Amino acid sequence: GATFNQTFLRQWNAGGQNSLNTGFILRQSADYARDKWSATHLLDAAYGLNFQEGIVRKIDDKLEYNLRVDHLISGQPMWKLSGFGSLKSQWYKGFAKPGDPDTAYVSRFLAPGYALAGIGLTHKDAFLEFYFSPVTAKYTVVLDPRLQAQGLFGLSPGQALRQEMGAYMNMRFKRNFPNKLAVDLRTNLFGNYLASPFSIDVDADILLVYKATNHLSITLRTQGIFDRDIAVRDSNGDGKVDAPGIQLKQLSGVGLTYNFGSIK
């Protein structure tokens, strides 16, 4: 769906700034099944911009594709043997502060990029999918030479690729309630066997959509991330970002929506 928010002020004594937010959210699945085999594709993408007093800021940026191939286990209709793959990055450059020059970006497409591949088990019912893999390879790539030189995202300076091996869990709860409210919750957990397996990377995302009419909706999206390899906070007050922390993002808006359903 596409979302919009606007603030217009003129001679407003209490102060404030004119602003416009616009963006899109796309979360689309495609399912295929034949005999005991099935495949599930998921594209999760978003992009948003804020226009305020002549300055353009990026407020949302997500690009993720997942593929899971399942084989039904005989005598266990709710359980499947699965192979899973995932690719994740962003559309455009990210900046630490608004107004930074174009050359001062701190991230961009495939810098970083993440890839996961593993085998495991899937349990699926009407509203909940649960996938667990005890053996998953995770790859972090940084294809930008300037960012490579800084040694970001858990890589050493000059390094372009990092490999991890660990356990991975993916959970998705999706339900459309009779009161026109749709809930879509996704949670991903990864523990690296080669480092500290009890230090878990977490990526949780919940999307709430209330359909006011067939094509007009109110959207609320909240995402939380903890990744021990990404520094986001100043741990000792010296002005340098040097430690991991909880990343939070919340976006809401009113906009146009269209439901393609699940493509089969």
Image (cartoon, helix red, strand yellow):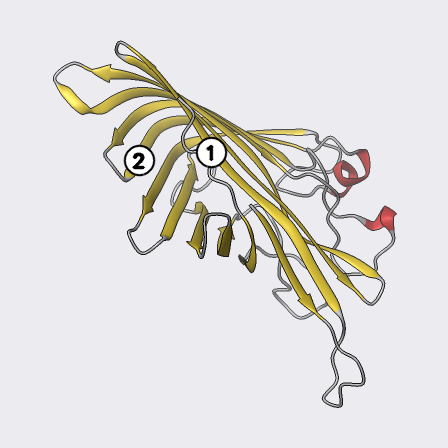
Number of the label disc, if any, that sits on residue 129: 2
Name the residue furthest left. 75
Q: In the rendered image, is residue 54 in sight?
A: yes
Question: Can you identify the residue that label 1 sits on?
Answer: 260
109 and 140: which is toward the camera: 109
Q: Secondary structure at mark 1?
A: loop
| First reached walking from the N terminus: tag 2 or tag 1 | 2
The residue that appears at 42% across and 41% down in the rendered structure is 188
Considering every residue shown, the one lying at the far bottom of the view is 13
At 65% from the left edge and 57% from the top edge, which residue is drawn? 242
Please tell me how crowded label 2 is: few (under 14), some (14-19), or many (20+) other residues with Cα within 10 Å.
Answer: some
Report the front residue among 261 and 123.
261
**Type of the residue with mark 1:** Phe
Q: Is 234 placed above or below 23 here?
A: below
Residue 208 image position (x, y, % from top left) = 43, 54
* Residue 132 location (% of width, % of height): 32, 32
Tell me the distance, in whole angstroms, between the alpha carbons under discs 2 and 1: 20 Å
Where residue 108 sits, quadrant-wise, is top right
Q: Are marks 2 and 1 in contact (CB under 8 Å)?
A: no
For residue 180, side relative to residue 102 (left or right): left
* Front residue of this view, candidates 77 and 115: 77
SS category of the residue bearing label 2: strand
Furthest toward the top, the residue is 35
Q: How many marks?
A: 2
Near mark 1 (Cα within 10 A), the count class, few <14, some 14-19 or many ≥20, is: few
Q: Amino acid at mark 2?
A: Glu
- Asked if residue 195 is positioned above or below residue 219 in the image, the reply reads above
Q: Is residue 137 placed above or below 170 in the rendered structure?
A: above
User: Percent from the top left, x then y, of residue 156?
Assistant: 68, 37
